Amino acid sequence: MLTYETQLWQKGLQRVAGVDEAGRGPLAGPVVAAAIVFNPQWLSNHEERFQGLTDSKKLTHSKREAFSVILHESAGVEIGIGIAEADEIDAINILKATHLAMDRALRELPVRPDMALVDGLAVPGLCCDSQNIVGGDGLSLSIAGASVIAKVYRDARMCELDAVYPQYGFARHKGYGTREHLQALYEHGPCPQHRRSFSPVREAETNLGQNPEQPLLF
């Protein structure tokens, strides 16, 4: 899980950031990105702390929470978090908003990285050089850590929004297009946290009071 980082460290690039996002698919809430920089000297003595750290989607809720705490409390780990809100997603589209959140996460780090390892396809316009890795959250420890931080942060944010808009069940489905969520949309209409540029939200707003079709899962 450190092959990509080690190659860059050996080239003299000491500040290597892993970058990943959470929340591209949901119908509501922000898209959240995280950037993580491991201190290579520190990590060489503490790598056992991160045994089992991988793509957040492959971890249980409790494992994600545990790794999030370890990452936040580790002296040799720097973390930046970037957010693009629902209105920004609607204004510029979800792909550009995701890239914006990633750039914001990198800028939140204490010092600009020498290189960013980005999960998935190449991301233009970042504040530092970058290398994309398809499936990177399962291949790079830095990206895996970023995926966990982004997922845990966004889940917590959706639980906060659930307290403000309890009629939608955000704490349970985190804004994804479950049948429960779609039914609530058709009953109550969208709230300010819904992404009106997403077709299921537009359809629910247009057909308020009717029953939704089969749930659209993202």
Image: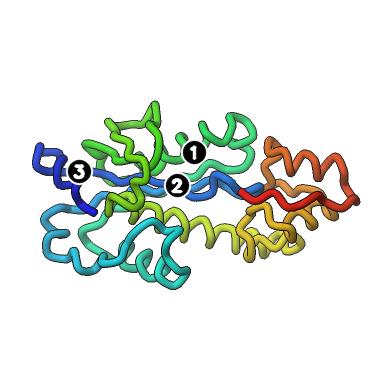
Q: Tell me, yes or no, whether the two marked residues, 1 and 3, touch with CB atoms within 8 Å.
A: no
Q: Tell me, yes or no, whether the two marked residues, 2 and 1, touch with CB atoms within 8 Å.
A: yes
Residue sitting at x 69%, y 49%: 216
In the image, 48: left or right of 61? left
Mark 1 burial class by Cα count in 10 Å: few <14, some 14-19, many 20+: many
178, 129: nearer the viewer: 178
Q: Which comes before the other along the chain, label 2 or label 3?
A: 3
Spatial separation of the CA atoms under disc 2 and disc 1: 7 Å
Spatial separation of the CA atoms under disc 1 and disc 3: 22 Å
Amino acid type at mark 1: Thr
Q: Quadrant of residue 82?
A: top left
Q: Which comes before the other along the chain, label 2 or label 1?
A: 2
Q: Which comes before the other along the chain, label 1 or label 3?
A: 3
Amino acid type at mark 2: Glu
In the rendered image, the vertical position of residue 119 relative to residue 61, given as above or below: above
18, 7: nearer the viewer: 7
Locate residue 61, reporting x and y percent: 47, 69
Q: Which mark is residue 15?
A: 3
- Give the residue pinned by disc 1: 98
Mark 3 burial class by Cα count in 10 Å: few <14, some 14-19, many 20+: many
Spatial separation of the CA atoms under disc 2 and disc 3: 20 Å
Q: Secondary structure at mark 1?
A: helix
* Eye-nearest disc, 1 or 3: 1
In the image, 209: left or right of 145? right
In the rendered image, the vertical position of residue 151 relative to residue 52, given as above or below: above
Locate the N terminus by quadrant: bottom left
* Eye-nearest disc, 2 or 3: 2
Residue sitting at x 44%, y 72%: 62
Residue sitting at x 67%, y 65%: 163
Residue sitting at x 56%, y 36%: 94
- Give the residue pinned by disc 2: 21
